Amino acid sequence: MKLDILAIGAHPDDVELGCGATIAKEISKGKKVGILDLTRGELGSRGSADLRDIEAINAAKILGVSVRENVAFADGFFINDKEHQLEIIKMIRKYQPEIVLCNAIDDRHIDHGKGSQLVSDACFLSGLIKIETKLDGKSQGKWRPKHVYHYIQWKNLEPDFVVDVSGFIDKKQDAVMAYSSQFYDPNSNEVETPITSKNFIDSINYRARDLGRLIGVEYAEGFTVERYVAVDSISDLI
């Protein structure tokens, strides 16, 4: 299956939190979107890997993505080396996305920055013909995505561009809250973490609203880029 967009996150819920509304919007426009999780989030303070597998499936259904896979790297301990790069290359060549969305280049959780660089490097290497990969016993052809964009996560990084996601913030919030083990629950007896506060859940709305305010729309999501953003016409800007 060829995808228009492949969204990649170090942990299940990274994609939903970072670019869930953008994904929902693109799907509404007929784009084929998939999600690739690098780990099962097994080091999370709450819940379990098995529970997060179920939550990830439910979140994917809410967003309407075409496919979701997990390469099950070691949460907290995966590295950017040849072995891990080749696994990502196989996924890139399998789905041949035009656009890859991936973790923030710098963030509170160490896996986010690591995942960001790992995916970026794999996207480049995937386009090299002399790197040979096989999937299900079949040789794969080279493929390099046209664009790699990094969504913004915990840290308020300055975006290079923002996407108007007005009308899709509710779907994003629903997808995030599919991870009921991870976020605000006043009845939970599990340990409190920086992402279990009500303020964190509220931030999904108020951060998107603030970015929207800055461009004159209701809600927006921000991204950083690896090269200049190009437009065909100055009138393409909103």
Image (tube, helix red, strand yellow):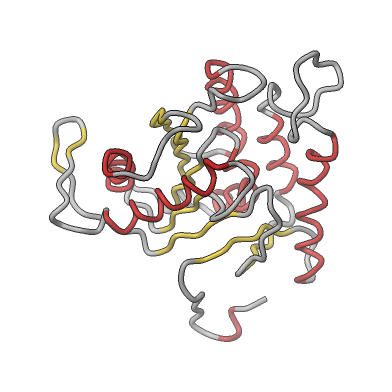
Quadrant occupied by the C terminus: bottom right
| Residue sitting at x 51%, y 42% | 9
User: Which quarter shows the N terminus?
Assistant: top left
Residue appearing at x 71%, y 31% in the figure? 177
Q: Position of residue 172 (x, y in %)?
A: 68, 42
The front one of 215 and 110 is 110
Residue at the spot x=29%, y=43% of the render? 94
Location of residue 236 with respect to 223 vertically, above or below: below
| Residue 1 in sight here | no
Horizontal and vertical percent position of residue 104 = 56, 53
Q: Inspect this view and state whether residue 93 appears.
A: yes
Q: Please name the residue shown 15% across and 47% down the image.
A: 132
Q: How many marks?
A: 0
Expressed as whole percent of the image width and height from the top left, the position of residue 77 reads 45, 33
Task: Classify 79 as above or below 107.
Answer: above
Q: Is residue 77 left or right of residue 236?
A: left
Q: Quadrant of residue 67?
A: top left
> Horizontal and vertical percent for residue 149?
50, 60
Going by the picture, which residue comes out furthest to the top? 189
- Compared across the picture, whether 163 is left or right of 57 comes to right
Q: Observer-nearest residue: 16 or 174? A: 16
Q: Is residue 151 left or right of residue 126?
A: right
**In the orientation shown, which residue stands out farthest toward the bottom?**
234
